[in-house]
Image (cartoon, rainbow, N blue to C red):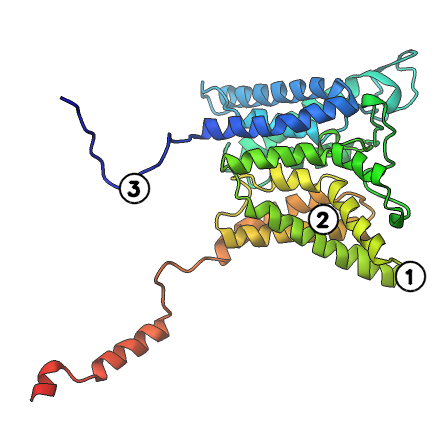
Amino acid sequence: MKQVLASSAPFLSGAPRGTRRILIDVLIALSPCLIAASIFFGWHVLVNAAVCMAACYGAEYVYNRLILKKKKLPDFSCLITGAVLALILPAKAVFSGWDFNFYADGFRTGGGADNILFSFDIILGCIIGSVFAVALVKMLFGGQGKNFLNPAAAAHVFLLLCFAFTALNTTGFGFTASNGAFLDGDKGTGDTGLFLAMFIGNQASLTAGTTSAIAILAGCIYLCVRKIIDFKIPLIGIGCFLLFTLLFDGMIAQSLLMRPDTPAKLFNNLAANLMAGSFLFCLVFMANDYTTAPVTFTNKVIYIAGFAFFTVLLRSFSAQGEGAIFALLLMNVLTPLLDRYVVPKPFGYTKPEKRLKAAKKLLSEPTVQEETA
């Protein structure tokens, strides 16, 4: 006789997805960015990713054993932190006063970051940043789900303040790299070759894994299909970013700098700013973090709009050329305020004044017995 299992609502369609499955999906979505970075910045990106992921895993394991006295093994969240951190760091680096690097002419012979064969400086930076991200930003506040800052973003800013990074030229496929982390110069040229290079990731940058728009788009589509993130959030973020770029870097900059921007120049500026820097990467992989992002959809919209606003503001008027990660940390700090003071109305909620008015109206109406009498 066939047995039938009866259960009460609610009913879930499909197999249940746990935290482990979600974290694996995020790692899969990050793989196109890792592949594109290794193509255009060399195999050192893969070494950095392996070091960051191993250091994050080791830091969390040691913290659990020595501080929390737990034997629990770390989950995949620390591996995501390590992968993201490696992608928002340069492939190679020269730290002032250290320079533990192998160049074409030998060990510590100098020649700039582009001439490094193997960079021990960036390896040390990966280890320091990973320990900082996991031990101080994540575990010190209670571990997974309790940190209020994105660990990888905080580690990036920490390393950026401690050490001097320089933008690296790309090396893959023999392309000529674009100059700088974002578009400079005359935006009216409409150079399709330059935009194509920015779209595929062939642009010089401080952050090796954030330059390929097509790789980020592939990861975003995967996360949306797997329903890890809401597809409306990236679209709203891109729309807000383009609007603020048109306002700040277009109209206001034109008024202040007397720059004769034509509609063609403004359009090229929008496309260049969107594909350059780390805004798209942060929007897809960091701004949608379940821990540091708001809970409700309304708060997420405010959060993403604020992230786009401060990114464009820093890009347009500050000495910091790329402000996406700084803007992300700022919105991380504001997230608890959004969740506390921007509270959605429950379904069927009515104001006390309306309930009182409805009660008075009900009491003033004659009953059935009064009408029959």
Query: Which label number is shown at residue 10?
Result: 3
Q: Is residue 363 left or right of residue 47?
A: left
Residue to which mark 2 is pinned: 311
Q: Eyeballing the image, is 333 above or below 96?
A: below
Residue closer to the observer: 154 or 219: 219
In which image quadrant can residue 29 be found? top right
Nearer the camera: disc 2 or disc 3: 3
Residue to which mark 1 is pinned: 258
Residue closer to the observer: 38 or 86: 38
**What separation in Å lies between label 3 and label 1 (alpha carbons)?**
61 Å
Image coordinates for residue 36, horizontal then vertical, percent: 72, 26
**What separation in Å lies between label 2 and label 3 (alpha carbons)?**
41 Å
In the structure shown, which secondary structural element does the residue marked by tag 2 occupy? Answer: helix
Q: Is residue 96 left or right of residue 280?
A: right
Of mark 3 and mark 1, the one earlier in the sequence is 3
Q: Amino acid at mark 1?
A: Met
In the structure shown, which secondary structural element does the residue marked by tag 1 occupy? Answer: loop
Image coordinates for residue 340, horizontal then vertical, percent: 49, 54
